[in-house]
Amino acid sequence: MLGHGPDDDEMTDDVKRVLHARFGDRTLTKAHVQFDIPENAPDGRFVPIFLETDLPQTPDHYVKAFHVIVDHNPDIYVAGFWGVPSIDTRIKMRRTSYVRAIAETNTGELYVSAKKVFVTLNGCG
Amino acid sequence: MATGDARVLLPPSITNGDAIYVRAIIEHPMDTGFFRTADGQPIPAFFINDVSVMYGDEQIAHFEWTSGVSRDPSVTFPLKATREAPVTVTWKDNKGGVYHQTVDVRFS
């Protein structure tokens, strides 16, 4: 069986709660953050992810942080990276889930992108 | 290799003003606390939750991790090489472990 959640990228209540705890009522806009992640991840223990932005990085306006959210992980908020214009790392995924990349600017805007990743082997126990 | 063994890798040749990629790797189990051993004993959570990157005396990056980052975490990120100075990465885990690794940016 593939896919446990809804087919669109509607956020679950748990995800909304985690985002609200971290970002309050700030709006997330679908733009300006790109990420590479395999559509099919055979091993949920090691899922490569690369995040970047198409926003120009200027001294007055820049992306100050990237955040990684995995809807169906025990810890929904996986990691945050401050001070880098792009980041390449590996994360764990418990099962098939939406993965969300969030870029946060120094002026407080939040940009988001979501991708569904199919996971064959549980990476979280 | 043991927990806390770390490497910070830079390109072999760097010129002033280059955008270089820094790769930082550390040996760490990144245990979630959700697994058990073969004989049923729980494996407690043990993971790096805080990473900082210094370039000279300036903190240029800071990462906040959970156990959702894969074991033996590796990160690669760009850095604008504007001066000859050490790059120091410091990893801290949830049991008080602190690990450092330093590499010097030298212009060729």
Image: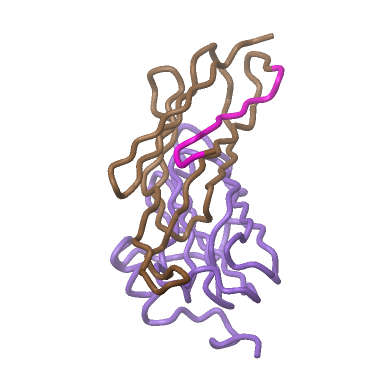
Q: Is B4 inside the magenta-drawn segment? A: yes
The residue under the point 45% across, 31% down is B89
Q: Please tell me whether the stretch drawn in magenta is mainly helix, strand or loop.
A: loop
Residue A40 found in image quarter: bottom right
In the rendered image of this protein, which colour is used for chain B? brown
Compared with residue A120, is residue B26 higher up or lower down, i.e. above or below?
Answer: above
- Classify B103 as above or below A115: above
Find residue B14 and report its horizontal and vertical position in percent: 67, 17
Q: Position of residue A92 (x, y in %)?
A: 53, 63
Q: How many labels does the image show?
A: 0
Q: Which residue is drawn at 48% across and 76% down?
A: A72
Q: Residue at x 64, y 27 (%)?
A: B19
Q: Which color scheme is applied?
A: by chain
Give B51 or B58, whichever is nearer the viewer.
B51
- What is the x, y in percent for residue B99? 40, 33
Is residue B51 toward the left or the right of residue A116 in the image? Answer: left
Chain rendered purple: A
Residue shown at the point (57%, 63%) measured from the top left: A45
Q: Say whether residue A2 is magenta.
A: no
The answer to whether residue B85 is above or below residue A108 is above
Q: Give the range drawn in magenta.
A: B2-13
In the depicted view, which residue is nearer to us: B100 or B10?
Answer: B100
Residue sticking out furthest to the bottom: A1
The vertical placement of A72 against B104, above or below, is: below
Q: Quadrant of the C terminus of chain B?
A: top right
Left or right: B56, with B17 as reference point: left
- Quarter of the picture holding the N terminus of chain B: top right
Q: Quadrant of residue B22?
A: top right
